[in-house]
Image (spheres, helix red, strand yellow):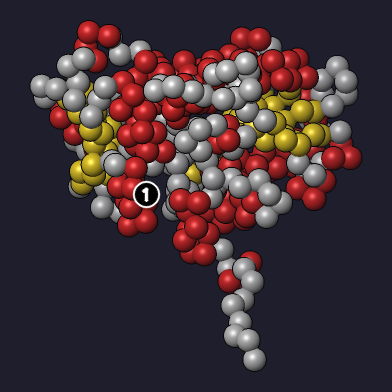
Amino acid sequence: MKNNKKIYEGENAIKSFLLPKNFGLTSIVELPEKLNPFKKDKVRIFVKLVHSAPLGNIKSLPSYVMLKNINKKEILKIKNLIEYSSGNTALSLTVLSQYFGISRMHAIITPDVPEHKQRLLQLVGTNLLISHGPACPDVFADFGGVYDAKRLGKRKGWHNLNQYVNPGNEESSMEYIGKELWYQFGKKLSIFVSTIGTAGTITGAGGYLKNKNRKIKVIGTAIKKGSSIPGPRGEVAIHKLGIDWKKVVDEVVLMTSRPAFEKSLALLRLGLFVGPSTGMQLAALLDKLKEYKKKNKLRELKNKDGEIICCFLACDSMAPYVDEYFENLPKSFFPKVKSIK
């Protein structure tokens, strides 16, 4: 980078552009009163736009750190990377791995992954392998996609990072989300909200914040049984993860599809182009604030300025999920297509 003017030059310019340490702080934006019904209670709600980093998704952070942490001698032997992922981790690893000398990225997916998501991965060069195991397998089970990735990763010239237990997952969120939030808010922060997917984000960032201020409440969100939201895990699957999120999370809010897509739609129509997992966090936060107010507990969350500062994360954009919005929300949410008379 030249003279701090965000100019990346030379043969390694793109790699330098993609380095998390070169992103700079991701922006934090406060929501207006129309999306914050608790404004009069001195509640302020913010979203940290982590998806504004290169590659457009939060998983670019752990993907880079996990690759960086591979032993230098070992990485020279790797020609094929393999991971159980149908979304942002697979996309990010496909792009980033080439800058570490790894020529091919293979993603194990299940048959239920929509064709448009498969095409997105193929677009960036991901090789897809179909597993007929469960969509959200136990990460320690001896069957399913996570197991298949571990098994195939033992082949000569192959490597499985296994994001579900890889320390780099938690490390990246501590470094690039937790530290940033503390720098941007400090002791003013009252509530931190994140989804529980691999649990790396909420454990890394939430753990860092808790170490700085034990009073910060960490709220996790998971999918209520019977619903489907891209990215996070369901209420049963979160108990089959390899990262110990329970040491950090104060409360888990179970969410259904409708409010997740509805809040995401409200955010993107205001100009914050975020996906359904971001809407899920906002919906969960509003539910908890409503509960706290009803139980007269809001005052317990106020900082020294008398405010309740809440922050959730924008994990990716709505772009990969356009079809799902129309599947999960009534037609009345969308303008009609009319012919010119």
Quadrant in which the C terminus appears: bottom right
Q: Is residue 229 above or below residue 180?
A: below
> Can residue 269 be seen in this snapshot?
yes
> Relative to residue 280, is residue 106 depicted above or below?
above
Q: Quadrant of residue 303?
A: top right
> With 152 as the anchor, is 207 left or right in this view?
right
Q: Residue at x 57, y 54 (%)?
A: 261
Count of numbered circles in the view? 1
Q: Which residue is mark 1?
A: 120
Q: Position of residue 325 (x, y in %)?
A: 53, 59
Q: Residue at x 58, y 14 (%)?
A: 208
Q: Return the residue found at the far bottom.
A: 341
Above or below — where is 282 with respect to 153? Answer: below
Residue visible at 10% across and 21% down in the picture: 156
Q: Position of residue 188 (x, y in %)?
A: 78, 19
Q: Quadrant of residue 165?
A: top left
Q: Is residue 189 above or below residue 123?
A: above
Q: Residues within 10 Å of mark 1 (few under 14, many from 20)?
A: some
The quarter holding residue 3 reads top right
Quadrant for the N terminus, please: top right
Q: Is residue 177 left or right of residue 108?
A: right
Q: Please state which amino acid type lies under the numbered disc 1.
A: Leu
Along the line of sight, the residue nearer the viewer: 136 or 316: 316
Name the outermost residue toward the left: 156
Is residue 61 at least partly visible in the picture? no
In the depicted view, which residue is nearer to us: 198 or 214?
198
* Element carrying mark 1: helix
Q: x, y percentage for residue 312?
A: 64, 33
At horizontal 63% and vertical 66% (from top left) the residue drawn is 333
- Locate residue 62, reporting x and y percent: 43, 24
